[in-house]
Amino acid sequence: MRIDIRLAKRTKNLNPSSTLAITAKAKKLKSEGCDIVNFAAGEPDFDTPDFIKDAAIAAIKAGFTKYTPTTGIPELKKIIADKLRKDNSLEYDSSQIVVSCGAKHSIFNALFVLLNKSDEVIIPSPYWVSYPEMVRLSEGKPCFIETLPQNDFKITIKDLEKYINPKTKAIILNSPSNPTGCIYTEEELRQIAKICVTKKIFVISDEVYEKIMFDNLRHVSIASFNKDIYNLTITVNGLSKSYSMTGWRIGYLAGPADIVDAVSKLQDHSTSNPTSISQKAAVAALNAPDDFSKLMSNEFQKRRDYTIERLNKIKSIGFVKPKGAFYIFCNISKLGLNSLTFANRLLDEAYVSLIPGIGFGRDDYVRISFATNLEQIEKGMDRIEEWLNKL
């Protein structure tokens, strides 16, 4: 007898990742001996600093391998509160902080406790691939605002006012942005904050790339302006990008007490605590001077500048100079190829992997990551230029 297995509707509405197929193909080709240049990476190529590894090893040897409080160990939460005060001018008590299994987990938790069925969440497009799917899993409805390259891919106040309606519950802001590298200025954030306060709209502020900013720009947290926007903001961050700890899975959110309490209960019944060992490593990372993040940011700026220098010579590709993160979002519309075709052909014919823009909401763009060394960037740009000349 054939058993009919029926999936929940929420899973049927999920879109598959357009990036995983390309990444898997690149890994397969590399395992077969092909010399693949990786412009697809969404993580720093720097190793996690030894002092952070040593803290994790010490935790293991000391037997710190059991359950911890669901929202994180008190020592880590206090250091996060200190970091938010020092770096972001944000006053949060430890009780207003939840440590989770990465910033992605924190964002999902926030959406899950905020949204009722059919609540709308404004998402500027291009967007990080997981935002719409997390909204849908939370039974909300993503509402996309198309941004323009002439505005550095940032929403305008006029657009925001046009898209807000009685069903709008929240907006997700990502600054610096994946995939565009755009950064909202303090004045732009103040204008957005004013509208959100007037309309009583929550802000989920994804600040995970805050330490990777270029040209002496300064990161600003939207929740720092006044109590009104503070009480509507869930600030999300993590250690993946700033300390090259992607696999350690430590992120956190800070926000109003009632939201944090709901997230705590949700995490009680889903993951429980983030990994105990990773929490000790995070304590070491946040206790140290900011030298490592500054070193990375300086190196990424050199890589950005070189990649831009090379792209400027390719007339068939357009781009906006990123001000943060480690990506360049490239317009390929002049080539007559959609992003998946472009990415697959470039990988098959030139052995360069990058991410198609369709997963970020733009099928006429591709994302180049410069989170690899200059030698690899030079090799990859040589191949792209040669390949494009043959098209």
Image (cartoon, rainbow, N blue to C red):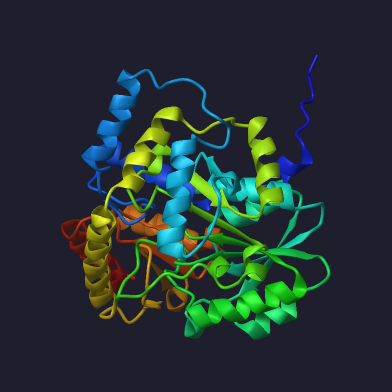
Left or right, 13 with reference to 338? right
The quarter of the displayed image where residue 272 is located: top right
Q: Quadrant of the image for the N terminus?
A: top right
Question: Which residue appears at 72% of the width and 67% of the height?
Answer: 201
Q: Is residue 280 above or below residue 328?
A: above
The image shows residue 125 at horizontal and vertical percentages of 58, 69
Question: Which residue appears at 18% of the width and 61% of the height?
Answer: 374
The image shows residue 285 at horizontal and vertical percentages of 32, 44
Residue closer to the observer: 374 or 101: 101
How many labels sit on residues? 0
The reply to whether residue 308 is in sight is yes
Residue at the extreme top = 1
Q: Is residue 258 above or below residue 225?
A: above
The quarter of the displayed image where residue 209 is located: bottom left
Question: Which residue appears at 36% of the width and 79% of the height?
Answer: 316
Question: Which residue appears at 49% of the width and 34% of the height?
Answer: 73
Residue closer to the observer: 12 or 269: 269
Residue closer to the observer: 165 or 338: 165
Q: Is residue 64 above or below residue 194?
A: above
Q: Quadrant of the image for the C terminus?
A: bottom left
Residue closer to the observer: 161 or 336: 161
The quarter of the displayed image where residue 51 is located: top left
The reply to whether residue 342 is in sight is no
Left or right, 356 with reference to 130? left
The image shows residue 160 at horizontal and vertical percentages of 67, 78
The image shows residue 36 at horizontal and vertical percentages of 26, 49
Left or right, 102 with reference to 211? right
Q: Is residue 273 above or below residue 200?
A: above
